[in-house]
Image (cartoon, rainbow, N blue to C red):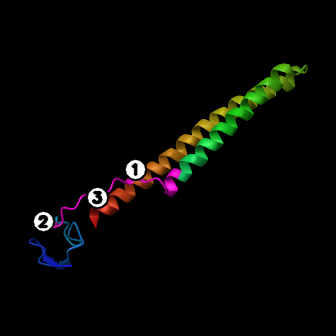
Amino acid sequence: MEKWICPFCNAEHDGSYRFCPICGCPNPGNDAELPDVSSTEKSSESTLVFIGKLVYGFSILLGVVTVVVGLLSYDFSLGLYCILLAVALLVWAKMSYYLLKVICNISNTLKSINRKLK
């Protein structure tokens, strides 16, 4: 790997860096295209999104079963508790799914920034 000298801080670096680690000046000789982080098939982020979809689907199924039990029960207070539990479960499922997606997007963004800085 060839060395390059930063024109701003005069520090010597190897050619693998896209930017100078000291001052941030771009390396004019390193114009390689970076792979898209979001296109990786086997990553921890895709596994986390899959787990989020499973939790979301299972929570919807459990919420529907709870609503049916609540509607079919003869006791009014039990039916009301089942319906409120189902609503809370569906809200929790939606929030947890989107929280996992946000965590995955943050991780992908940090990986992309890390690759651009190298």
Say if 15 sits above or below 68 in the image. Answer: below
Q: CA distance from mark 3 to mark 1?
A: 12 Å
Give x and y (percent) for residue 70: 82, 24
- The quadrant in which residue 118 appears is bottom left
- What residue sits right under mark 2 in the picture? 28
Task: Please give the range of residues in magenta.
Answer: 27-46
Residue ID at (90%, 21%): 75
Q: Specify the label residue 34 is tagged with.
A: 3
Q: Is residue 56 magenta?
A: no
Q: Residues within 10 Å of mark 2 (few under 14, many from 20)?
A: few
Q: CA distance from mark 2 to mark 3?
A: 15 Å
Q: Total of numbered circles in the picture?
A: 3
Q: Tag 1's secondary structure?
A: helix
Please report whichever mark, 1 or 2, sits nearer to the chain's N-terminal start. 2
Give x and y (percent) for residue 28: 12, 65
Residue ID at (20%, 74%): 15
Task: Give the residue type at disc 1.
Answer: Ser
Q: Residues within 10 Å of mark 1 (few under 14, many from 20)?
A: some
Task: Give the residue type at disc 3.
Answer: Leu
Residue ID at (80%, 28%): 81
Q: Is residue 40 left or right of residue 48?
A: left
* 2 and 3 marks in contact (CB < 8 Å): no
- What residue sits right under mark 1 in the picture? 38
Residue at the front extreme? 41
